[in-house]
Image (cartoon, grey):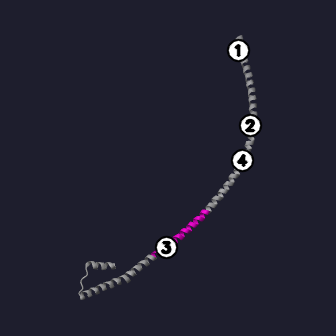
């Protein structure tokens, strides 16, 4: 082996030795950093554990409260449904009664209108018609007496006035 080759080997071994020493130093630094990080994590865990316990307790209380609220809401909905059913029954009954009353009112009104028409017809036929006939008879008798007695004839105005009285 020549001397150049020896020097190259010495240099390579020296670089390799330096790299191993450097790696050892880096490994030691990583060890120290890991240990410091572990200490920080332990301190953090010590602080987080009470928070986690409180959160767990709060979660359990919340579950209990939510269960109570759900139960009460379910009961309220059931009560509301029962009340709506009752209101619906009352409204149905009121509607039925109102319809029956409206039917009765309609029958009474129909009966009243029919009686009014019958009364009007009766008055027309029983009172006014005979009155017209009596009036016509009286006018005829008067006209006959006027003719026999030679009285003067009535004017158109007087005849119209007499007719208007009976209209």
Of the numbered discs in the image, which one, if any, rests on residue 44?
Answer: 2
Residues rendered magenta in the picture: 83-110
Separation of residues labelled 4 and 1 (CA atoms): 71 Å
Q: Quadrant of residue 146?
A: bottom left
**Residue 149 drawn at (x, y percent):** 24, 88
**Residue 76 drawn at (x, y percent):** 64, 58
Q: Secondary structure at mark 3?
A: helix
Of discs 3 and 1, which sits in the foreground?
3
N-terminal-most mark, 3 or 1: 1
N-terminal-most mark, 4 or 1: 1
**Residue at numbered disc 4:** 58
On the rendered image, what quadrant is the C terminus found in?
Answer: bottom left
Residue at image location 62% in from the left, 60% down from the top: 80
**Residue at numbered disc 3:** 105
Of discs 3 and 2, which sits in the foreground?
3
On the rendered image, what quadrant is the N terminus found in?
Answer: top right
Magenta stretch secondary structure, dominant:
helix
**Residue 21 drawn at (x, y percent):** 75, 22
Separation of residues labelled 3 and 2 (CA atoms): 87 Å
**Residue at numbered disc 1:** 8
Q: Secondary structure at mark 2?
A: helix
Of discs 4 and 3, which sits in the foreground?
3
- 10 Å neighbourhood of mark 4: few (<14), some, or many (≥20)? few
């Amino acid at each position: 082996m020549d001397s150049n080759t020896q020097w190259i080997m010495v240099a390579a071994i020296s670089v390799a030795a330096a790299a191993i020493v450097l790696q050892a130093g880096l490994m030691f630094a990583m060890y120290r950093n890991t240990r410091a990080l572990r200490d920080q994590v332990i301190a953090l865990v010590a602080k987080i554990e009470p928070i986690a316990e409180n959160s767990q307790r709060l979660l359990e209380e919340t579950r209990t409260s939510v269960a109570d609220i759900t139960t009460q809401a379910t009961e309220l909905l059931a009560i509301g449904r029962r009340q709506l059913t009752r209101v619906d029954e009352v409204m149905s009954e009121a509607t039925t009664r109102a319809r029956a009353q409206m039917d009765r009112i309609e029958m009474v009104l129909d009966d009243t209108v029919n009686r009014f028409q019958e009364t009007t017809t009766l008055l027309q036929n029983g009172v006014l018609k005979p009155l017209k006939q009596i009036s016509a008879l009286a006018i005829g008798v008067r006209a006959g007496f006027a003719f026999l007695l030679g009285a003067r004839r009535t004017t158109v105005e007087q005849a119209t006035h007499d007719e208007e009285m009976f209209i």
